[in-house]
Image: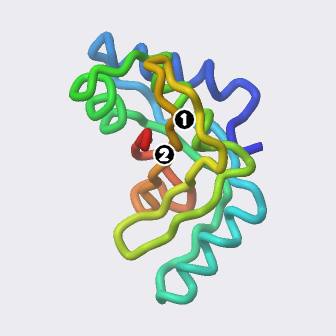
Amino acid sequence: MPLHHDGRDILRASLETLKEGGRPLVVTIGTLTDHQHAAINAYRTQHGLPLLASPEVVFLGRHLYNSRAVKDGYTIDDILDMIESALADTSGVIATHKMTALRSSTPRPDQYGNHVTDEAVFELTQRRPKAELYSVIPK
């Protein structure tokens, strides 16, 4: 499973720290499945990019918090639901020249009456050899 069993609690603590104006640490929140990791590396190999060495996913969260909570008005619970949905073991890889992401394979009913398909966008160079969860997008 990509999100560790305590990943939601770790994410909540980081997001609460950001909400209070603090600086959270980089934390490991999950692990890509073998299939997801292989699919990302297949794309990177095909395009001459360095491989993603580790399947671990880390989180800092400043951009994600500012985008979803501050700018878009989502609650921390909303953000946690998005992340958990997008980082499911059944989520598919989206790899393009603009981004690398996981897209949930199952639409999720959100707290506002919509059915959304969540995408987790990764940053693959700053925290190398691990993928950083950079943002999450409800679509």
At numbered mark 1, what does the secondary structure look like: helix, strand or loop? helix
| Label whose residue precedes the other's in the sequence (1 or 2) | 1
Furthest toward the top, the residue is: 20
The amino acid type, in three-letter code, at marker 2 is Leu
Which is more foreground, mark 1 or mark 2? 1
The image's mark for residue 48 is none
Tag 1 near tag 2, CB within 8 Å: yes
Please identify the quarter of the rendering in which residue 72 is found.
top left
The amino acid type, in three-letter code, at marker 1 is Ile
Quadrant of image for the N terminus: top right
What residue does disc 2 label?
A: 133
At numbered mark 2, what does the secondary structure look like: helix, strand or loop? strand
Q: Residue at x 59, y 33 (%)?
A: 108
Q: Residues within 10 Å of mark 1 (few under 14, many from 20)?
A: many
Q: Is residue 114 above or below residue 85?
A: above
Q: Is residue 17 above or below residue 126?
A: above
What residue does disc 1 label?
A: 83
Please identify the quarter of the rendering in which residue 19 is found.
top left
Image location of residue 12, percent across then percent down: 52, 18
Image location of residue 51, percent across then percent down: 57, 75
Q: Residue at x 52, y 34 (%)?
A: 115
